[in-house]
Image: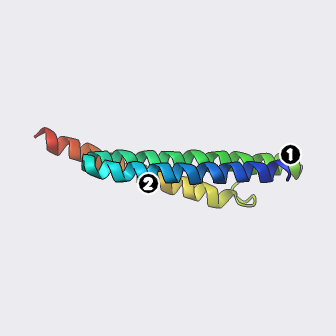
Amino acid sequence: MDFWDRVKTTIDRSFDSSKDWFEKAKGTAHELGERGVLRVEIMQLESRAEKLTAKLGALTYDELVKRDATHVDRDSPGVAEVIEEIESIEQRINEKEAALAALKKREAQ
């Protein structure tokens, strides 16, 4: 197994175990109320974004070192998809943070 395959396997395993943990935490958060649920969902999204950022770094490394490319851009294999998913996650985090802020404001009134 070459380096890139090991990195991909590690990232996938890490994501799977994080996903399991967050699912358990999400169940507990429901007991804590809407605010807890939003916080757990934000944590899940942030964790996924971190994994995708690592994947993007691995793709970049693969292109520059393994394939001897001179540069990497959005058109490089796999890069656009990862960037789009990270951007989507950022948007969802912003929406959940806005919902959390609105909830806190309602609770303060």
Nearer to me, 28 or 49: 28
User: How packed is label 1: few (under 14 Cα within 10 Å), some, or many (20 or more)?
Assistant: few
Q: Residue 54 at what x, y percent from top left? A: 66, 45
**Residue 25, visible in the rendered structure:** yes
Marked residue nearer the N-terminal end (2 or 1): 2
In the image, taking residue 26 as reference, residue 109 lies left or right, namely left
User: How packed is label 2: few (under 14 Cα within 10 Å), some, or many (20 or more)?
Assistant: some
Q: Secondary structure at mark 2?
A: helix
| Residue depicted at 32% across the width and 48% down the height | 29
Q: Secondary structure at mark 1?
A: helix
Q: Mark 2 against mark 1, which lies toward the viewer?
A: 2
| Residue depicted at 34% across the width and 49% down the height | 28
- Residue ranking furthest to the top: 108
* Residue, disc 2: 23
Looking at the rendered structure, the kind of residue marked 2 is Glu
Q: Residue 71 at what x, y percent from top left? A: 80, 48
In the image, taking residue 54 as reference, residue 86 lies left or right, namely left
| Residue depicted at 63% across the width and 56% down the height | 82
Which of the labelled discs sits on residue 65, or is there none? 1
Q: Residue 46 at what x, y percent from top left? A: 49, 45
Q: Report, in whole angstroms, how far the alpha carbon at label 2 lies from the one at label 1.
A: 37 Å
Looking at the rendered structure, the kind of residue marked 1 is Val
Q: Quadrant of the C terminus?
A: top left
